[in-house]
Amino acid sequence: MERIPEEGEYIIVKIKEISPNSAIVEIKEYNYVNGFVHLSEIANCWIKDIKKFIKPNQIKVAKVLRVDRHRSYINLSFKQVPVNISREREREYKIEQKANNLLRRFVEKNKAGITYEEIKKKLTDTFGSIKDSFEYLSSAGAGTFSKDFKLEKNFTEDLYNLVKKSIVKKQVYINANIFIRLYDSDGIEKIKEMLDIKEENVRINYICAPKYSIKITGRDYIECEKKFTQISKKILGFSNPKHNIINIERIKG
């Protein structure tokens, strides 16, 4: 069955065709299936000429709005993509291209009884991308990687050393302030409960009443945004206009 993206996912697309009221795009990460972007989802403003906003062969980030799996029909939006997520997905796409090119050149130079297409399929079938497979290689080590994929030891060790030098892992983060004013008799216990976040890479600090800070660290903004949304829902779930006030304010930058 043809792989297609999920609703709510942010994907990399290449613009194929443009009409006055829509655009047809090629979804590069899903075997180049096509998607559709209506004029109303191009930008957050009135559009007189669509070609002033998008161009053929342009690479963009789109949000998946609706998927019809029977028809392989995928409805997309450009305007509903947050700026930070767009930058992050574009960065990931460039890293994936770099990783692909690095793997291709390495395999062609170091003959090991396997073609570039064969090893690429092995890695993408397991990890979804070459970038993620390189991250696994970097953390697991050449020996484990060699056994997992039945590759020659010298070949894998050379690839490991090349990946360590060429692919730099980057951390991103989200900062926010939390303002909590509780007037319940058990307010202190409620604050302890709402701020008891047992999540990896999440740090909450007390600043001064009624202010707390939260910092979420991750490999990419999409991961951080998802975690931030989950934590915000938990904290705001304690809000009761009659007895307390809870606000969460993102810090830009």
Image (cartoon, grey):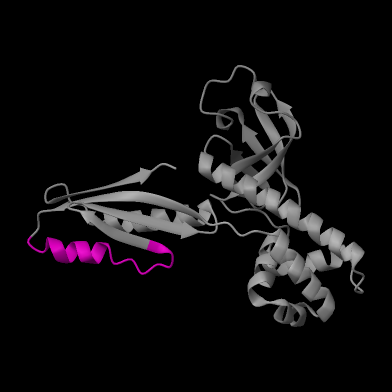
Question: Is residue 154 at least partly visible in the picture?
Answer: yes
235 with respect to 20 (left or right): left
Q: Classify the position of the N terminus by image quarter.
A: bottom right
Residue 60 drawn above or below residue 206: above
All told, the count of numbered labels is 0
Residue placed at 60% from the left, 16% from the top?
48
User: Farthest residue in the left direction?
Assistant: 185
Q: Position of residue 54 (x, y in %)?
A: 67, 28
Q: Position of residue 244 (x, y in %)?
A: 15, 51
Taking depth in this image into account, of 193 and 38 the one nearest to the observer is 193
Residue 166 drawn above or below residue 27: below
Taking depth in this image into account, of 196 and 236 the one nearest to the observer is 196
Residue placed at 54% from the left, 59% from the top?
219
Q: Position of residue 221 (x, y in %)?
A: 51, 51
Name which quarter of the figure residue 130 lies in.
bottom right
66 with respect to 174 (left or right): right
Taking depth in this image into account, of 40 and 61 the one nearest to the observer is 61
Q: Position of residue 75 (x, y in %)?
A: 61, 41
Q: Is residue 19 inside the magenta stretch?
A: no
Residue 234 drawn above or below residue 250: below
Q: Which stretch is magenta?
A: 185-202
Q: Classify the position of the C terminus by image quarter.
A: top left
126 with respect to 175 (left or right): right
Question: Is residue 129 at least partly visible in the picture?
Answer: no
Residue placed at 59% from the left, 30% from the top?
42
Name which quarter of the figure residue 227 lies in.
bottom left
141 with respect to 173 (left or right): right
Residue 60 drawn above or below residue 18: below
